Image (spheres, rainbow, N blue to C red):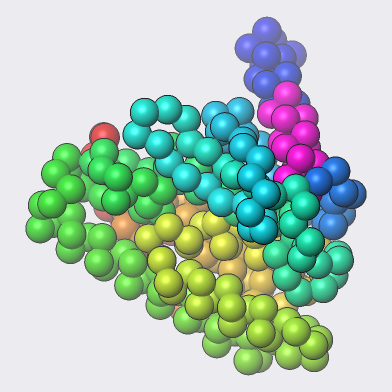
């Protein structure tokens, strides 16, 4: 292993250690509700979260809320959290675990760092690339609207997948959980496409729910991962075949590749 490779390996190791430290803080020192996993998407989600943990300021706030991310115009973003939050579910039951909470909030930070668009407070944490340097330009507003609509349509496919997912429908509380998370994305598709996908994959994997809903959410996360690199707009995802292996990428973003890289910030 060369010097640069060793430094990179050590950097990843340190970011994961910091991530675990923050997870313990957010959960009030309780044991993780999700077991560790070698699943490729789950590992990638936690690596993405870990790589962003060092750039965020964590603040304890006893306000009865699990955690929330906030951008700052003058300094690092913040994640405020309540370590005494009492409503985290046990592993395998529907709900928003401490692990899911941290992955969710750190994906907001990642989106804020990765996506290219004008610097504007209304665009902090946007889950898509936007053209140009003028936040008020008609072409930017049109792109913003198209992409928000596509995200909503993609999450409608998650809702549809739930109706044909026996692992969801046959377990009390899980249909309602899926419905709540889809509604949450719909409330702010500009910011919650990736954060909700990240937390749902971990939550579903923890419960061993590997059916159509998990496939559909993975497709959303994989589309976003490709678009981060290649640029372009959010691509439309149709129904993902329930027979598709959940251990492989369920979606390839050919549309984003054809559009070329996004403009620099």
Residue at point 55%, 83% (across, down): 159
Residue at the far front: name it.
62
Q: Position of residue 233 (x, y in %)?
A: 31, 57
Q: In the picture, residue 119 is in which quadrant?
A: top left
- Is residue 62 rendered magenta in the image? no
All told, the count of numbered labels is: 0
Quarter of the C terminus within the rendering: top left
What type of secondary structure mainly makes up the magenta span?
A: helix
Residue at point 67%, 78% (across, down): 177
Q: In the picture, residue 190 is in which quadrant?
A: bottom left
Q: Is residue 120 above or below residue 141?
A: above
Q: Position of residue 160 (x, y in %)?
A: 55, 87
Q: Say if residue 195 shows up in the picture.
A: yes
Left or right of 243, for residue 20: right
Q: Which one is nearer the viewer's eye here, 228 or 204? A: 204
Q: Which one is nearer the viewer's eye here, 106 or 156? A: 106
Q: Position of residue 79 (x, y in %)?
A: 57, 42
Q: Is residue 246 above or below residue 180?
A: above
Residue at the far left: name it.
138
Residue at point 82%, 73% (across, down): 93
Quarter of the N terminus within the rendering: top right
Left or right of 192, for residue 6: right
Residue at the far top: name it.
3
Residue at the far right: name it.
31
Give the residues drawn in magenta, as a range: 14-27
Q: Position of residue 232 (x, y in %)?
A: 31, 52
Residue at point 73%, 24% (across, down): 14
Q: Say if residue 223 shows up in the picture.
A: no
Q: Which one is nearer the viewer's eye here, 264 or 229? A: 264
């Amino acid at each position: 292993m060369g010097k640069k490779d060793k430094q990179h390996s050590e950097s990843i190791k340190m970011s994961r250690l910091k991530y675990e430290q923050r997870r313990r803080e957010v959960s009030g020192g309780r044991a993780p509700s999700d077991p560790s996993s070698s699943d490729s998407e789950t590992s990638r989600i936690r690596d993405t979260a870990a790589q962003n943990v060092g750039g965020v300021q964590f603040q304890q706030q006893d306000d009865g809320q699990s955690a929330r991310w906030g951008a700052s115009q003058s300094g690092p973003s913040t994640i405020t959290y309540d370590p005494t939050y009492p409503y985290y579910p046990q592993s395998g039951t529907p709900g928003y675990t401490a692990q899911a909470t941290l992955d969710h909030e750190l994906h907001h930070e990642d989106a804020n760092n990765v996506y290219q668009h004008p610097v504007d407070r209304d665009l902090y944490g946007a889950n898509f690339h936007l053209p140009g340097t003028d936040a008020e330009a008609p072409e930017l507003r049109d792109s913003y609207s198209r992409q928000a609509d596509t995200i909503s349509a993609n999450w409608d496919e998650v809702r549809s997948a739930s109706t044909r997912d026996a692992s969801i429908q046959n377990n009390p509380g899980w249909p309602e959980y899926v419905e709540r998370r889809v509604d949450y994305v719909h409330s702010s598709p500009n910011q919650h496409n990736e954060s909700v996908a990240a937390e749902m994959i971990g939550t579903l994997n923890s419960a061993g729910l590997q059916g159509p809903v998990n496939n559909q959410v993975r497709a959303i996360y994989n589309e976003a991962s490709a678009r981060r690199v290649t640029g372009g707009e959010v691509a439309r995802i149709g129904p993902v075949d329930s027979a598709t292996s959940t251990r492989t990428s369920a979606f390839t973003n050919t549309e984003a590749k054809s559009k070329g890289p996004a403009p620099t910030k």
